[in-house]
Amino acid sequence: MLRLGEILPENITIDTIDWRGKIIPLRGTVDGTPDEASGYASALVDTLNEDELFGPLFDDANLTSLMQNPATGLLSLEIRLQFTEG
């Protein structure tokens, strides 16, 4: 998880990391306009997939949820990581 902190952009905050067997959902918020935040979230997914540590450890990371939180105005995100088989 230290590596996640190293590659996480400053405008993305991860609030929750759940470990559910082979699946790890990351939940958090993205700062910026909706268009910018969407791009930042997608870029993080690409970074996770291409990272030297995360890439081989997990199947493709997937952005499973991205929606605006009306209370904060920020976008809430969920990224799903699944351990590779074998």
Image: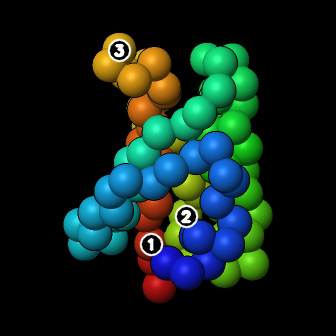
Provide residue 23's location: percent of width, then percent of height: 34, 63
Q: Pointer 3: residues within 10 angstroms few (<14), some, or many (20+)?
A: few
Locate residue 3 relative to residue 85 in the image: left or right. Answer: right
Q: Residue at x 55, y 36 (%)?
A: 30
Check disc 2 and report the residue beneath it: 59
For the residues labelled 2 and 1, say whether their Cβ atoms are less than 8 Å apart.
Answer: yes
Residue at 50%, 50% in the rendered image: 13
Which residue sits at x=42%, y=32%?
Answer: 76
Q: Look at label 2 and name its amino acid.
A: Asp
Residue 19, placed above or below residue 32:
below
Q: Which mark is residue 83?
A: 1
Q: Secondary structure at mark 2?
A: loop
Please identify, in this view, whether the residue under mark 3 or under mark 1 is nearer the observer. 3
Write down the residue under mark 3.
70
Q: Nearer the viewer, residue 29 or 59?
A: 29
Between the C-alphas of marks 3 and 1, the distance is 33 Å
On screen, residue 32 above or below 61: above
Where is residue 83 drawn, in percent x and y?
44, 72
Q: Amino acid at mark 1?
A: Phe
Q: Determine if residue 49 is in view.
A: no
